[in-house]
Amino acid sequence: MSTMIRNEPGQNRYTIALDDQVAGFADYRLEGSRIVFTRTEVDPRRRKAGLAGALVEYALDDVRTSSALTVVPQCTFVAHFIDAHPDYQELVDRG
């Protein structure tokens, strides 16, 4: 089974696909120098596979390496992920 994660800036979302079928997404909106993650969703049949964590990790790594944006974790899953992985705290603007 092949997994592909990518940013789809035209749709303001990161997606994760398994064998070319989208299994989940993380929506965001850009607000100046901030990226606000608003919602993360994974197909209920695939929730135990760790896809949401892999998706959010990819998105945060992408923000870190390809921009100077500050992350606003409005989505509770993204907020919990960052809380559980302190190496992402430097990206966060919780204000």
Image: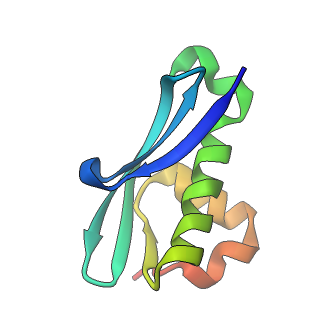
Which is more toward the observer, 46 or 74? 46
Residue 33 percent across, percent down from the top left: 33, 84
Quick check: can you spot residue 42?
no
In the rendered view, tell whether residue 5 sits above or below residue 24: below
Q: How is the protein colored in the picture?
A: rainbow
User: Total label count?
Assistant: 0
Q: Which quadrant of the figure contains the C terminus?
A: bottom left
Which is more toward the observer, 9 or 83? 9
Q: Residue at x 74, y 65 (%)?
A: 85
Q: Residue at x 59, y 46 (%)?
A: 55
In the rendered view, tell whether residue 74 sits above or below residue 11: below
In this rendering, position of residue 17 left or right of residue 11: right
Q: Quadrant of residue 78?
A: bottom right
Q: Which quadrant of the figure contains the N terminus?
A: top right
Residue situated furthest top in the rendering: 45
Residue 53 percent across, percent down from the top left: 66, 45
Which is more toward the observer, 16 or 39? 16
Quick check: can you spot residue 85?
yes
Q: Residue at x 55, y 49 (%)?
A: 77
Residue 88 percent across, percent down from the top left: 66, 73
Q: Residue at x 52, y 78 (%)?
A: 92
In this rendering, position of residue 14 left or right of residue 44: left
Which is more toward the observer, 49 or 65? 65
